[in-house]
Image (spheres, helix red, strand yellow):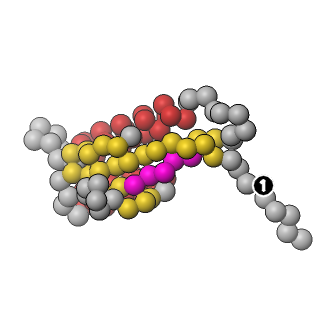
Amino acid sequence: MKKQFPLTHPKKQPARQLEAVKAEISKYLKRERKKPLPEGVDFWDFDCRCGPDEAAAEPVHVAELPKQIEALQAGGTMECYVEILAKPGKRAKKSESS
């Protein structure tokens, strides 16, 4: 998903618009995680970028995405660019430390 989200709306309060953006992102992540995994893959991983526009978007962990969007809204940004790309992930085995 590559999308520019408006953080303001003429008929909605800013907090409700922010919740709508976060809900849409959450719904997309849930839908992607439901897809069948390829052979030899443990989970779906995500490459995420977030910023005021596509050129200024910085890489961010998927768990930090809502906080990044809140920070952009608090900074007075009118729009937020979010890019989420699903990729297969494989868990690394824990090394035994004695």
Q: Quadrant of residue 70?
A: bottom left
Q: Secondary structure at mark 1?
A: loop
**Disc 1 residue crowd, few under 14, some 14–19, many 20+, Cα 10 Å:** few
Q: Quadrant of residue 73?
A: bottom left
Q: Nearer the viewer, residue 70 or 77?
A: 77
Quarter of the figure with the N terminus:
top left
Q: Nearer the viewer, residue 88 or 97?
A: 88
**Is residue 50 visible from the viewing direction of this image?**
yes
Residue 48 part of the magenta segment? yes
Decide if residue 77 is on the left or right side of residue 51.
left
Quarter of the figure with the C terminus:
bottom right
Q: Quick one: which residue is furthest to the bottom in this view?
A: 98
**Is residue 70 visible from the viewing direction of this image?**
no
Q: Quick one: which residue is furthest to the right in this view?
A: 98
Q: Nearer the viewer, residue 97 or 83?
A: 83
User: What is the x, y in percent for residue 48?
Assistant: 44, 52
Residue 88 part of the magenta segment? no
User: What is the x, y in percent for residue 2?
Assistant: 34, 43
The image shows residue 72, relative to residue 8, as above or below, that is below
- Give the residue at x 60% y 43%: 88
The image shows residue 60, relative to residue 6, as above or below, that is below
- Could you tell me how many numbered marks the image carries? 1
User: What is the x, y in percent for residue 29?
Assistant: 47, 38
Q: Amino acid at mark 1?
A: Lys
- Give the residue at x 12% y 38%: 11
Magenta residues, start to end = 45-49
- Give the residue at x 18% y 61%: 76
- SS assignment for the magenta stretch, majority: strand
Instruction: Please give the residue where the numbered disc 1 appears in the rendered image.
Output: 93
